[in-house]
Amino acid sequence: MATVMARAVRLYRPQCAPLLVQRGSQRLPRLLLRTSARIPPPASMTELLVKPVLFCSALTVGSFGVAAWVRAGTEVDRIRGRFFQRMHQGSNSLSQWWASIPTAKRVVGCFAASYITVFALWKVPRLHRFMMRHFMHHPYEGHLSQYVGCHFSHMTLMHLGFNTMALWSFGVPMVERLGTEQFLAFSVGAGMCASLASQLHSVAVGNRIPGLGASGVIMGLVGAFALTHPDAVIYVPFLPFIQGPAVAAFGLLMAVDIAGIAMGWRVLGHAAHLGGQLFGAAYVLGGHSLLFSKPLHVFANLRLNG
């Protein structure tokens, strides 16, 4: 999850706001001027820390529980069968086209479509307040919906393009490896760890700058991909002559984000990036057994004996 670019960061300083409002289309909504750095903090640390920890933990564990339950049974397959049967009755060509797309590309394509949809909603002036409330993480506002919505949200075309390209590059092979249900739960877990890391860091340093973007989830995918495909070669976008093994690239990304946190860089959401990276690495190194494999075994036995 990237913090809103350098230009947006300056917008949150009142003395710079009048100048930036007059610039081009790559700007935050004007109503941010009335909310920047003047949002009163919640009355207690419960709103700042306890509720986010409980919410992110419950959503992560619950997502893996649902994923394990779905994988263990056949109910979803029956539902999908009826769904595609209805699609077949209504539009034979559409159902055939959808079925012809590999599952991994369908899953990642749906994520990309959600990013594009939310990006388009940001362009509707009447929705700015709603989008700010639910699709941008404000550390001191305490709206739990922001911890989820911010991961689908991008305000600039460049931010959207880079994250969508990275999602496709790392998401497709990870869907193929994990399967749809586990991949969806993994994405929730990586996003929640990224949001929580950003929240804890913001409270610790008193940072009120909001953030958004799918980078936290993508960094989780990068971490998982690097540890499951350590020898895969990763290229820098538009600079194909810069390349290296995935595990080395992952280590470099972590080093940059740790340095960014230590030095107080605020152009990117380094804490969110690091949270996603740590979740991805921890999941591959053993977390999958606790969060998915063991529940899957329990639910499979329940279904077989039920």
Image (spheres, helix red, strand yellow):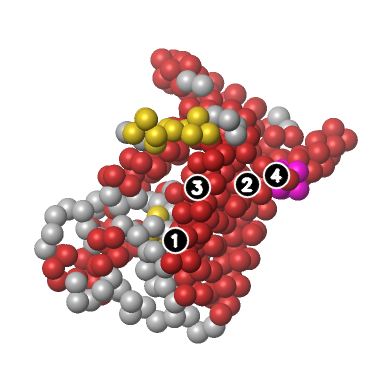
Which is more toward the observer, 48 or 300?
Answer: 48
Q: Label 4, on which residue?
A: 285
Tag shown at residue 260: 1
Q: What is the distance, in whole Å, between disc 1 and disc 3 at their CAs? A: 12 Å
Which is more toward the observer, 70 or 80?
Answer: 70
Tag shown at residue 252: 3
Q: Is residue 180 visible?
A: no
Q: What is the distance, in whole Å, between disc 2 and disc 1 at their CAs? A: 20 Å
| Quarter of the figure with the C terminus | top right
Kindly identify the amino acid type of the residue bearing the numbered disc 1: Gly
Q: What is the distance, in whole Å, between disc 4 and disc 3 at their CAs? A: 19 Å
Kindly identify the amino acid type of the residue bearing the numbered disc 3: Leu
Which is more toward the observer, 257 or 125?
Answer: 257
Q: Is residue 82 visible?
A: yes
Residues in magenta?
Answer: 287-292
Q: Is residue 193 left or right of residue 124?
A: right
The mark closer to the camera, 2 or 3, is 3
Q: Is residue 86 left or right of residue 78?
A: left
The mark closer to the camera, 4 or 3, is 3
Task: Describe the element under mark 2 as helix, strand or loop.
Answer: helix
Answer whether labels 4 and 3 touch (C-beta < 8 Å): no
Which is more toward the observer, 244 or 156?
Answer: 244
Q: Is residue 305 left or right of residue 234?
A: right
Q: What is the distance, in whole Å, between disc 4 and disc 1 at their CAs? A: 25 Å
How would you classify the magenta stretch by its main secondary structure?
helix
| Quarter of the figure with the N terminus | bottom left
Q: What is the distance, in whole Å, between disc 2 and disc 3 at their CAs? A: 14 Å
Q: Residue at x 19, y 72 (%)?
A: 16
Which residue is at the far bottom?
A: 43
Answer whether labels 1 and 3 touch (C-beta < 8 Å): no
- Which of disc 3 and disc 2 is earlier in sequence? 3
Can you give x and y, in whole percent of width and height, for residue 230 in the image?
Answer: 60, 34
